[in-house]
Amino acid sequence: MIGNTSLIDELIRNKNPFAGHIVVRSSQIWGKSFPDVPSINAHASNAVFDAVDKVSKGERETVGITIIAEKGAGKSHIISRIRHRLQTEDNALFIYMGKYDNLNQIKYEFLQTLASSLRAHGSKNVMQWQEIAAALINEATGWDYTPQQYIQNIYPTYLKKYSTKFVDKLTELILPNKPDITNPYLIKAILWTLSSVHTNYANYWLAGLDLTQNQAEVMGLPNYDKNDKEAEGLKTVRQILDIISDYKVPVICFDELDNTEVNEYGLLSAQLVASLAKDLYNNLKRCVFLLAMYPGTWNEQIRALPQVEAIIDRLVSEQLDRQPLRLNNPNADDIVAIVSQWLQVFYEENKVVPPHPVYPFNEDKLREFGKSKPTIRSILKWCAENFGNSPTKSNPVKEYYQSELSNIEASIDELIENEEAISKALRLAFSSLKGEKLEGINIEEVEDIQAKAADKGYIDFKIIGNESKVKIGVDVIQQSGGKAVGAALKRLIEYEKFDITRGCLVRSKKINSGASIPNKCLKQLLHHQGGEWVMLQSQDIKPLLAIWFVQRNCKSYELTEEQIFDFIKQEKIAISNPLVREILSEPSGEQPSNLTDDDLPISIPQSFDSSSDSIDLNLPIVD
Amino acid sequence: MNLLLPISTALCLPTSDIAALIQGRIIAAIPKMFIRPGQKFALYPVDLFAIEEKVSIQAWAKCELTQILDESLSLERLSRLTIWAQDALDKILHQQQHIFLCYLRLYNYLSLTRYQ
């Protein structure tokens, strides 16, 4: 540790721990936590911890808690605190929903959120799915292995000897213990998460997405019926949560409810989530709900719902006055504590000892600032602006962009599967290029595709250029299932119907050569219609996703659209992006050469002939 | 009230409803989506069969409150209190699952003075 003042001052001149970190993003709820002072608004986090305690002791079955506070007052801080505390304990499982991209299929979207939340690590440093899988097996077999032991030793040993029949056998053993589970494949898919080779595909299937024919056959998991995704979604959600709740208390948190989007029936996100929470509350065995929103959202949107009394009874189930919990703005002591906590983390990371805990700030000044009862966000913003000797000259967008970029690094594996995010990020990039000339195209407009209901949701958008002579329809397709890919490609070759002059597929993965419709469409697109397949690579999409996230959060970040577009231009984020250029460039007529393979690597024997009755569950396991 | 505030959104309503609002015969409208209190709109007349090229906007309005009604409430009472026939209300409920009852405060578009 170094206590030299000039070194500290140099550090302060070069680094600003507050910049770019003023808003808690959902990745920070999962990942590294924000510096936290647990005494601030402890009443809110304790309400959740008490609820988990009561439910796990069987004193209560379901508890609903709603927290209200103004923008920037620390709602997401509290959620981050709850998640990190639950992660160190063994009796709860945390599920977080903080974005609502498809309000018309909110139940299906919740299923995807549930699946991706369960991918996150729990207390044992393995996926929460894997913890559940190990508990299921231990209960049915009387074994007592940890998830790590299953992953590293048991599964490899048994899969080698018995192939996939091993998982069939375990499923058969477990099902009698779970009479409420009407879909046996759910159990099977959860068991597959313990096989390192299959875990990604199992996760994919559990999220309601299609596997390729080959994957589905090997793993014995049939693809979902797509006709009623919403109804199936809720059924699956209920069953998954019921399986979980035999072992742990699910804590389901709905955040970021204060947006103004409506579904096809005119209802807002907060209203749809309140109804969803009510449905779940009525149908789950054990659960804790947490909703966080602005007071205005509660008063104007939730209280306007029909049969609101029943909803309120569930959303604030523990409050005798039937009012949500309010967060308090920090007082002077709290402010000194928060700032010290942030700085302690910063100085420890940089191995220096400051002259006093709030250096370079002045404690009296911080206390003075506290008299105005600022929100947590405004305190952090003030700190960012007043840290160091000279005010930071850098572009405010840059700090947020950098911070989003590093968040993306941590979650790129999931993001690369998120067609919606990728296509919106691309759309933003092209919108910023209006008026520019690039790869021989004068970009004039970026527009929605006009389509009837049956064709909606396929081609993502079109880029119009060269006096409307060029209209490139762009479709990001990352799904594996042949049906979904075929349906999308069929639309991409209908130039006249969708008023495009060129179809452009953006995708990183091979298309299964056995899938006839996708391959037929692809050939038509590339060889006969002058269309293009552009290789999606994570290094190209990362900066576009980062700036799109900044734009999405521009209200919280207090940035204008104009600042963001200026930054995109100044840093050449769109204009020099290889993916953007490739989409605009003259099509090569060929498939990209370095596509990734989407099929299972063959590391286990693909068949085992005898029936599962002959499986010996007492193989010697090498530790 | 800031009189220079530009109103960039329009609320589409039947011409007869707009007339009734201006005459003070009703104080609420039935939009197709939930309107948040505080939202401001120009009232844009739309009729089922006529698509006019030029419309005249006579008033703008601010939402004071929106209630959501579903089949658990009596539409007969709402019909008695308003200008809407019960079968028209039944039809909206059937098509949209809900009825959004949006209470509006009206302002004259040209003089920007409040209607009484």
Image: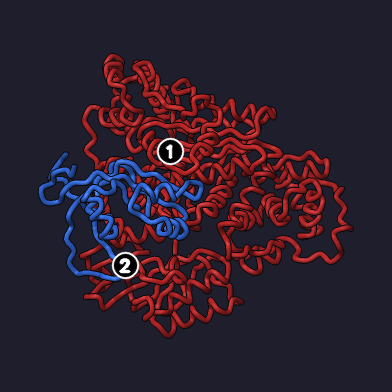
Chain colours: A red, B blue
**Residue A398 seen anywhere in this rendered image of the structure:** no
Locate the C terminus of chain A by quadrant: top right
Given the image, on which type of amino acid does mark 1 rest?
Arg
Task: Say which residue appears at 55% left-offset and 42% top-offset.
Answer: A278
Q: Which mark is residue A405?
A: none
Nearest the eye: A170 or A102 = A102
* Tag 2: amino acid: Leu
Disc 1 and disc 2 in contact, CB within 8 angstroms:
no
Residue B90 shows in this picture: yes
Other-residue count near label 1 (Cα within 10 Å), few / some / many at <14 / 14–19 / ≥20: some
**Figure label count:** 2
Chain letter, disc 2 residue: B
Cα distance in 3D space between marks 1 and 2: 33 Å
Q: Is residue A319 left or right of residue B36?
A: right
Secondary structure of residue under mark 1: loop
Give percent across and percent down for residue B35: 34, 48
Q: Is residue A504 left or right of residue A464?
A: right
> In the image, residue A590 lies at what x, y percent?
44, 78
> Do circles 1 and 2 both sit on a common chain?
no
> A1 above or below A129?
above
Residue A124 sits in which quadrant?
top right
Residue that badge 1 annotates: A303
What is the number of the mark on residue B48?
Answer: 2
* Residue drawn where x is 27% and y is 63% of the image: B46
Examine the rendered structure and indicate whether residue A15 appears above or below residue A481: above
Furthest residue to the left?
B111
Q: Residue A587, image x and y in percent?
A: 37, 77
From the top left corner, tell me how far across and down residue A417 is, in percent.
50, 58
Secondary element at tag 2 = loop
Outermost residue on the top side: it is A364
